[in-house]
Amino acid sequence: MYPRKAKQLIYGAGFIAVFGGILALIIYFLFLKPAPTCFDNIQNQNETGVDCGGVCAISCEQKYAQPLVVNFVKKIKDGGNKVILLAEVKNPNFDYASDDFVYSFNAYDISGNKIQSITGRSFIYAGETKNLFEVIDADKNEISEDLTFLQYDWKSKDSFKNPDVEIKSSQVNINAAGSVYPLTVTGVVKNNDFIKVSKVILSAFVYDSTGTLAGVSKTELENFNPTDERNFTIIFPTDIDTSLINQNATKVYVNAIR
């Protein structure tokens, strides 16, 4: 009889242990388990990522996207009392793009005090490197400059794609002395995409005989239907020294947004 009782006790203890474990789990999940939040490092609720998207206030793009990188900022003399501040910026994110970001070019005096600032807006695609430039008043006390970013609106790369727009042709035109515009860059741009493009930005970089950047300018065209081709003209300042321009070294870039 003893072995039989021992078995009954063992089975009974095992049953109690299992039942107790189940009961403990029920109590935990009903009464003790913390409610899901956007700060628990778990992808729960209807989040699209860990603590982001869905019911969470922050999107996964805003949470995980890395800030833009400034490769360089430099000044280009634009004749008269104007200076172009030119920056090359890179999007280090290959999964995220920004359909709208705010930037500020800043100039400083010898003491590090900000003496000039100009703000602009732009967009950038996933993994893209692009140029930004603005014209400011020249100042003899201005000795340094930088570019800062004030705001980003991040999107997934699939929801903000680069449209297929290309420059079909371009040429540099050095016009006769006394012309209203002594230097222009003209050409043809085409929308190869299957959807409408809301804006096309065309930028021209002209260089002198030594390969030094001598001037930058741009123009914008709007509302391109699929397969549209349009002529464009990029105008340079009237006091640019056209005798220094190497026409064969000019570069024209296109940047478009749907």
Image (cartoon, grey):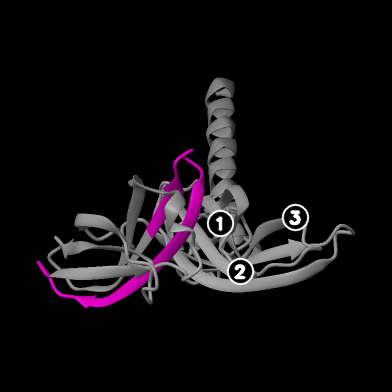
CA separation, marks 3 and 2? Answer: 19 Å
Q: For the residue labelled by badge 1, is the local secondary structure a helix, a strand or a loop? A: strand
Q: Point out the residue furthest to the top here.
A: 3
Q: Position of residue 89 (x, y in %)?
A: 52, 52
Q: For the residue labelled by badge 2, is the local secondary structure a helix, a strand or a loop? A: loop
Please give the residue where the numbered disc 1 appears in the rendered image: 86
Residue 9 inside the magenta-drawn segment: no
Q: For the residue labelled by badge 3, is the local secondary structure a helix, a strand or a loop? A: strand
Residue ID at (57%, 30%)? 10
CA separation, marks 1 and 3? Answer: 13 Å
The front one of 250 and 127 is 250
N-terminal of the two: label 1 or label 3? 1
Could you classify mark 1 by the number of other residues whose Cα lies within 10 Å: few (under 14), some (14-19), or many (20 or more)? many
Please give the residue where the numbered disc 3 appears in the rendered image: 144
Is residue 258 at least partly visible in the picture?
A: no
Q: Main secondary structure of the magenta part?
A: strand
Magenta segment, which residues? 204-228
Residue 222 inside the magenta-drawn segment: yes
N-terminal of the two: label 3 or label 2? 2
N-terminal of the two: label 2 or label 1? 2
The front one of 2 and 56 is 56
- Reply above or below: 86 against 7: below
Q: Position of residue 255 (x, y in %)?
A: 34, 61
Mark 3: amino acid: Ser
Residue ID at (75%, 55%)? 144
